[in-house]
Amino acid sequence: MRPMEQISVDQDRLGALYTQLGEAGAEDVVCRALEDLARRLTQCEQHFRDAAWADLQKSARSLIAISDQIGMADLAKVARDVGQCVTNNDATALAATLSRLFRIGERSLTAIWDIDEMPE
């Protein structure tokens, strides 16, 4: 059984980017953010495997900042939870929370391009 996570994109945040930067500028920011998110998620997985806790926490903080920038509050929240698990030195919770981070991350990366999610 694979849990399905509800994903939402803050359309107000995304709309504000489009208003501020124009369509081309906002799309550039979003594309770069998505690339960064994918890279950071991969780094989180590697840091976990290497037991590089400080690096994992740093990557999670980066995920928070990038996610917040483009309206991915769900992803930012779970990345905060990952950081808290590292701080608490709770390996079991960390493994479970990282699994959730990867599920939400995967779905978030595709959700932002869903035509219904894009600002008009």
Image: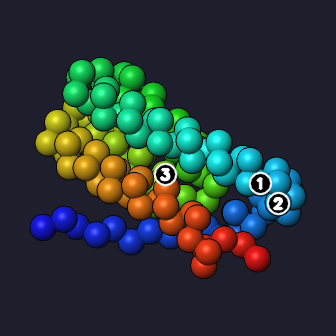
Residue 68 percent across, percent down from the top left = 60, 52
Q: Nearer the viewer, residue 48 or 87?
A: 48
Q: What residue type is labelled 1?
A: Ala
The residue under the point 19% across, 65% down is 2
Quarter that holds the C terminus = bottom right
Q: Do the residues labelled 1 and 2 touch (CB within 8 Å)?
A: yes
Residue 41 percent across, percent down from the top left = 41, 40
Residue 103 seen from this side? yes
Q: Are marks 1 and 3 in contact (CB under 8 Å)?
A: no
Residue 87 seen from this side? no
Residue under numbered circle 1: 26
Q: Are marks 3 and 2 in contact (CB under 8 Å)?
A: no
The residue under the point 28% across, 45% down is 98
Query: In this rendering, is residue 37 above or below 115?
Result: above
Q: How far apart are marks 1 and 2 (CA)?
A: 5 Å
Residue 48 appears left or right of 77: left
Residue 89 appears left or right of 29: left
Q: What residue type is labelled 2?
A: Glu
Residue under numbered circle 2: 23
Between tags 1 and 3, which lies in front?
A: 1
Could you say whether the residue bearing mark 3 is in a helix, strand or loop? helix
Residue 58 percent across, percent down from the top left = 45, 28
The residue under the point 72% across, 47% down is 29
Q: How far apart are marks 1 and 3 (CA)?
A: 20 Å
Residue 119 appears left or right of 20: left
